[in-house]
DNA sequence: CAAAATAGGTCAGCAATATTAACTTAATAG
DNA sequence: CTATTAAGTTAATATTGCTGACCTATTTTG
């Protein structure tokens, strides 16, 4: 055979090995890592949502009420449609929750200025106070986690979470786009 | 008044302004940032869980079934108690889901070796295949998010999520500690 | 202006997922 | 032998979600 033995020429010794990493930062997306991510999301979300439950239980409210309070608080004057789009539930499911919150004086409704069909939702003072209580219970856990991750870690967290949401929700988070798109 | 005017001595000019950042990495834990974190968690989790729903719908299964499949797949031979501890639901809630999965041939039960009271749960081949389908639907979204965040971002994400879970769940994730503690 | 579209409310019924509580069986542990 | 434990079962209930149909008030459009 005429095939030359590679290791006999000096030049061959300097051929770099086939590189994998250089083009851009490499991220481990193998099965184990992705499975871990599933677990992380499940447990973090489970324990994040659970801390507010004690407060809710006292008041005979559920997580659905908390979600509504949260997003009305974040978007004062949001319409029913807007809230529906965010929560991704049906009008009837929201109605029960919303009626309870209005009846108990946590949420106020006002007709829209230009379009009087709209019911603009806001938190009453009691609603703000309650939402604050619920928020504070989660805030502690959240702040601990933020400090554990550090500024760079928080950036990573934000990027990763943003990338996991639908485009509409991303726009909503970014401030562009209305709640309807979320 | 005998109080000296500070700006008249040369040395005073070099007094550094009161610094905030230096002691350790500073993380913004103000209200707006914590509120944003709430939003991120809600939308990311909402859209992460939703992608598997189409598959589940075909098979007339729900998210509860998915969760059970996932954690049995992650912990072959897990006991009913272990699964209950992870999911944090009652025996009766799990029973319905588990019976359905066993009836439909996705989950197999085997008595424990040493303690024959235990029912060790495993996925059948069909169960593994189904779990795989469900996993793959989420995997895509997850991998995209991981790549968007980069290696450093992923580290931050992991740290932050870990810090948000209860200690038991953290131990479980880390491999130390049994499912019972999760 | 009349008709269509929209925002919202409401009613009835149903399904999934969760709860508490009490009871049974089988097996282990003291 | 007794107590405890793991699991299954049964029954009744609550929460949260769904579909579909129908109604009112208001805005928009032809």
Image: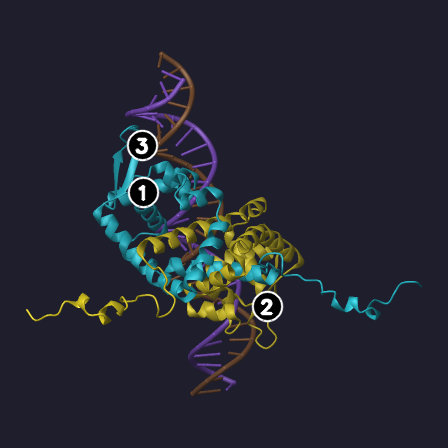
Chain colours: A yellow, B cyan, C purple, D brown
The residue at which mark 2 appears reads as A77
Element type where label 2 sits in the image: loop
Of circles 2 and 1, the one toward us is 1
Task: Between residue A114 and residue B156, name the one nearer to us.
Answer: B156
Task: Between residue B33 and residue A5, name the one nearer to us.
Answer: A5
Element type where label 3 sits in the image: loop
Q: Residues within 10 Å of mark 2 (few under 14, many from 20)?
A: many
Mark identifier at residue B118: 3
Outermost residue toward the right? B1
In percent of width and height, residue A155 lies at 50, 63
Of circles 2 and 3, the one toward us is 3
In space, the residues marked 2 and 3 are separated at their CA atoms by 55 Å
Q: Residues within 10 Å of mark 1 (few under 14, many from 20)?
A: many
In percent of width and height, residue A57 lies at 55, 45
The answer to whether residue B76 of the structure is visible from this angle is yes
The residue at which mark 1 appears reads as B98
- The numbered mark 2 sits on a residue in which chain? A
In primary-sequence order, the first of circles 3 and 1 is 1
In space, the residues marked 2 and 1 are separated at their CA atoms by 44 Å
Mark identifier at residue B49: none
């Amino acid at each position: 055979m005429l095939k030359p033995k590679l290791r006999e020429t000096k030049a061959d010794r300097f051929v770099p090995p086939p590189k994998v990493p250089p083009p851009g930062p490499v991220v481990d997306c193998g099965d184990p890592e992705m499975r871990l991510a599933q677990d992380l999301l499940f447990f973090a979300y489970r324990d994040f949502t659970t801390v507010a439950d004690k407060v809710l239980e006292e008041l005979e409210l559920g997580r659905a009420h908390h979600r509504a309070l949260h997003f009305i608080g974040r978007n004062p004057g949001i319409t029913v449609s807007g809230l529906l789009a965010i929560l991704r539930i049906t009008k009837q499911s929201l109605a029960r929750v919303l009626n309870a919150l209005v009846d108990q004086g946590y949420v106020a409704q006002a007709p829209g200025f230009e379009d009087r069909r709209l019911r603009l939702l806001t938190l009453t003072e009691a609603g703000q106070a309650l939402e604050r209580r619920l928020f504070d219970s989660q805030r502690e856990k959240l702040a601990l986690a933020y400090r554990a991750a550090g500024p760079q870690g928080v950036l990573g967290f934000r990027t990763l979470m943003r990338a996991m949401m639908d485009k509409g929700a991303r726009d909503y988070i970014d401030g562009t786009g209305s709640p309807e798109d979320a």
